[in-house]
Image (cartoon, helix red, strand yellow):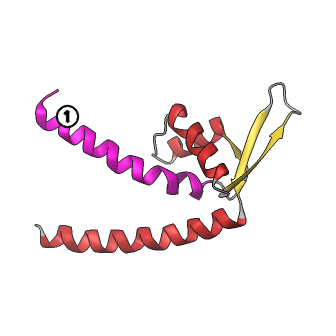
């Protein structure tokens, strides 16, 4: 990999890492378990490795943004996650901030042409 490509790769990783949380929160208005969430995000063009997702889900739960429950009715137990009320409020705030950032970045990028 050339030096330029390596720099671009690292910067793209940083950019994606900053957006994964809002992407995950956006999909948890209805209950999802980890693998279903990976699949759902992937279908919508957001690649998230399970090794990234599961620690994120645990962190969001410990912060009170998610609620979880185990479903043991299936052949293998699954832990389902859903936004808590606090999580919904945080998600709504992040969406507003995201829109402000996108608007500002659009202006900056247009000026930079």
Q: Looking at the picture, how far across and down is residue 68, in whole percent?
A: 75, 47
Q: Looking at the picture, how far across and down is residue 109, in whole percent?
A: 19, 67
Relative to 82, say whether 85 is above or below.
Answer: below
Relative to 67, say whether 47 is above or below.
Answer: above
For mark 1, give the secondary structure: helix
Q: Looking at the picture, how far across and down is residue 103, in whole percent?
A: 32, 74
At 50% across and 67% down in the image, what residue appears?
94
The crowd level at tag 1 (other Cα within 10 Å; few <14, some 14-19, many 20+) is few
Residue furthest to the front in view is 62
Mainly helix, strand or loop, the magenta region?
A: helix
Q: Looking at the picture, how far across and down is residue 82, in whole percent?
A: 71, 53
At 12% across and 67% down in the image, what residue appears?
112
At 45% across and 46% down in the image, what residue appears?
45
**Quadrant housing the C terminus:** bottom left
Relative to 73, say whether 68 is above or below.
Answer: below
* Residue at which label 1 appears: 6
**Quadrant housing the N terminus:** top left
Is 17 contained in the magenta span? yes
At 44% across and 71% down in the image, what residue appears?
97
Q: Which residues are magenta?
A: 1-27
Q: Nearer the viewer, residue 62 or 92?
A: 62
């Amino acid at each position: 990999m050339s030096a330029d490509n390596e720099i671009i790769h690292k910067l793209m990783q940083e950019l994606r890492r900053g957006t994964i949380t809002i992407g995950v929160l956006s999909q948890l208005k209805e209950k999802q378990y980890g693998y279903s969430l990976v699949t759902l995000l992937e279908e919508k063009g957001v690649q998230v490795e399970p090794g990234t997702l599961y620690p994120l889900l645990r962190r969001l739960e410990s912060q009170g943004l998610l609620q979880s429950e185990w479903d043991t009715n299936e052949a293998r137990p699954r832990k389902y996650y859903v936004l808590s009320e606090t999580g919904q409020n945080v998600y709504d705030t992040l969406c507003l901030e995201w829109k402000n950032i996108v608007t500002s970045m659009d202006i900056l990028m247009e000026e930079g042409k």
